[in-house]
Amino acid sequence: MSATPLLELRGIDKSFGPVQVLRDVAFAAHPGEVTALVGDNGAGKSTLVKCISGIYPADSGEFLFDGRPVTINSPRDASALGIEVVYQDLALCDNLDIVQNMFLGREKRSGIVLDEPTMEQMAAETLAGLSVRTVKSLRQHVSSLSGGQRQTVAIAKAVLWNSRLVILDEPTAALGVAQTAQVLELVRRLADNGLAVVLISHNMNDVFAVSDRIAALYLGQMVAQVKTTDITHSQVVELITAGRSGNLGLVAEPALSTTGSGAESADTNPGAVR
Amino acid sequence: MTTTVVKKEGPAAVAPAPTVGSHVRNYVSRVRGGDIGALPAVLGLIVLCTVFSIMRPSFLSAGNFANLFTQGAATTLIAMGLVFVLLLGEIDLSAGFASGVCAAILANVVTVLGYPWYVAVLAAIATGVLIGTILGVLVAKVGIPSFVVTLAGFLAFQGIVLMLMKSGTNISVRDDTLVAIANRNLSPALGWLLAGLAIAGYAAVQLLRHRNRVARGLLTDPIAVVAARIGILAVLLGLAVALLNQERSRNVLVTSLKGVPIVVPIIAVLLVIWTFVLQRTSYGRHIYAVGGNKEAARRAGINVDKIRISVFVICSAMAAVGGIVAASRANSVDPNTGGSNVLLYAVGAAVIGGTSLFGGKGRVLDAVLGGAVVAVIDNGMGLMGYSSGVKYVVTGLVLLLAASVDALSRRRSAATGAR
């Protein structure tokens, strides 16, 4: 695919006091692709996302955006670059309608008066651009929406600001089957529209359904970043649980070397780190 | 190209252009879903007025109608400020005595120190702003629950009023302008002029918005509904002004008493200003957002602490305005100004009008409608000769009723998903 990733991280370290949460992490997100970020609980997914979105500054390491080195020290820096995060708990206000939520904190104004018609038009265009047809009225309160529709609004809110990298934190965690399909379709469409998408998920079916690449974190280390087509379901599970699978992942300790296994992944792209 | 996309994919394609019928059906389904707004207050007002005017025909007299406004004015003004605090799900129990402190400052500045009325009014409102800032900082920055902070304020301000009154005596307010606020009327012609301006202004705003939205191809309320809204306002204002412009002096030869009480346009102007702030500015939007989901508001880059402090400032400043009106009506300030039932009537007014105690839902208009309900109960039961004891019990029951309506409609909207 595209040669230069939109966002590339090299050698990211992050510690909280004595606990090192991220160790020399490398990560890349390409425009037009969905990169799935997988890992067990406590592997460092959320911390990595918070480093990218500027909530926690990384202790060391390089950030390249569009090939240029950048520094991200605050959420403001991240949104200035066009990085938007859709959080698991959605962060929508139930008592506001769809348009009000999408523009929350960044309302369009003419003078001191809110410019409602412009906001409503922009919201309609954004939703239309994402082919969202499920909401009845843009002026209905978010409390009246289903889980999938709320997720859609949260994603559309992130897309509205000409963002270039959208990070989705478990967008399907609380959704039913049909709604999950709806949201995954939307995730795919974001990438097809040219955005770089990072999808955090625990659900292997979701990961294989939409992602182009899979990045696996194991105890704070990036053990593999490979194309989805080059890896199997069970290999990803092994990477998540053991940190390695065949010739992927952490270098096997000599005593445990397992030369014979992993034959099925004969032609794995050597995207593995270490 | 974009317009075709919007037409094809946007809401316009899903929901057909609304008609009067669908507008009414939407409203009915919203009410059923628990979004009842000010409906209970309006219905309650109609029922109460009907009952009282049957039991005591004098209730409907022009004189009593004018009394209703001046009696309810201070409570309503304090309630308007309380709406802001309630919108965040907080409470200000000190608003009553805050109005007392501000009234005491007013009386001291104008009567004891002898400054002109506008200096006294500014001093009173500045006192309100100061009180609100202190309360707001304690709640937002120190993190004490607003219930406790304002309960402490309730006690302390009561003491401050006593100290400002030099222990027990009252201070009279004899300044002509200040006395006029709650005791004099506009000339009938001026009353009609202001009513006409209000209707014309409302119509202009509504019609311009309608035209703008139609021009941009956005969903709009049908023009008939817009016209009906303007018509209802015109009829109500017209009736009220006509009634208030009737002669209500018992002896015309001694003194003529007619016209709209001066507090009415004061309340109306503040109602318009605060409604504008809440509905049409991003500051108002942020108040609703913080009241709905504080964490979401914080992540959206809203300075939550600033919003929380600011609502206490608005509340106490409005309490100051209420205190000024109360001082004007009584022609004096005594140690009990802003005490006894003032605060509870004001909270009751906001809640009866439809402002939720849980935050995130409410309008400034609620305070006015609820204030009218409280004033009608107080006034009507007084006319029927009931004691204060009975009045308090009934008002308490009505507040309880309003709070249960709030809680039940909230449960219902949680069940149906609409709010």
Image (tube, coloured by chain):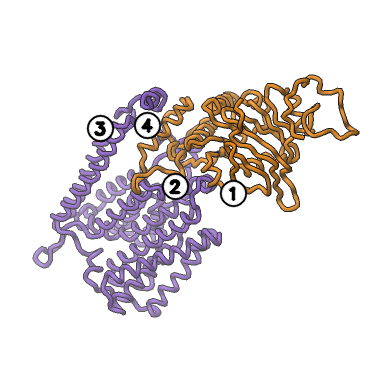
Quadrant of the drawing holding the C terminus of chain A: top right
Label 3 and label 2: CA atoms lie apart by 30 Å
Q: Residue at x 66, y 27 (%)?
A: A213
Tell me, yes or no, whether dots 3 and 1 are on the same chain: no
Query: How many C-alpha atoms fall within 10 Å of the one at disc 3: few (<14), some, or many (≥20)?
Result: few
Q: Chain of mark 2?
A: B
Foreground disc of the pair 3, 2: 2
Foreground disc of the pair 2, 4: 2
Dot 4 corresponds to which residue?
Answer: B26
Q: Are marks 3 and 2 in contact (CB under 8 Å)?
A: no
Tell me, yes or no, whether dots 3 and 4 are on the same chain: yes
Foreground disc of the pair 1, 4: 1
Dot 2 corresponds to which residue?
Answer: B288
- The residue furthest right is A255
Tell me, yes or no, whether dots 2 and 1 are on the same chain: no
Name which of mark 3 and mark 2 comes first in the sequence: 3
Q: Residue at x 74, y 31 (%)?
A: A272
Residue B397 percent location from the top left of the image: 42, 52
Residue B372 falls left or right of residue A201:
left
Dot 3 corresponds to which residue?
Answer: B224
Residue B327 percent location from the top left of the image: 31, 68
Residue A110 falls left or right of residue A61:
left
Say which colour chain B has. purple
* Viewer-nearest residue: A198 or B156: A198
Label 3 and label 1: CA atoms lie apart by 54 Å
Residue A256 percent location from the top left of the image: 88, 32
Say which colour chain A has. orange
Q: Secondary structure at mark 2?
A: helix
Dot 1 corresponds to which residue?
Answer: A73
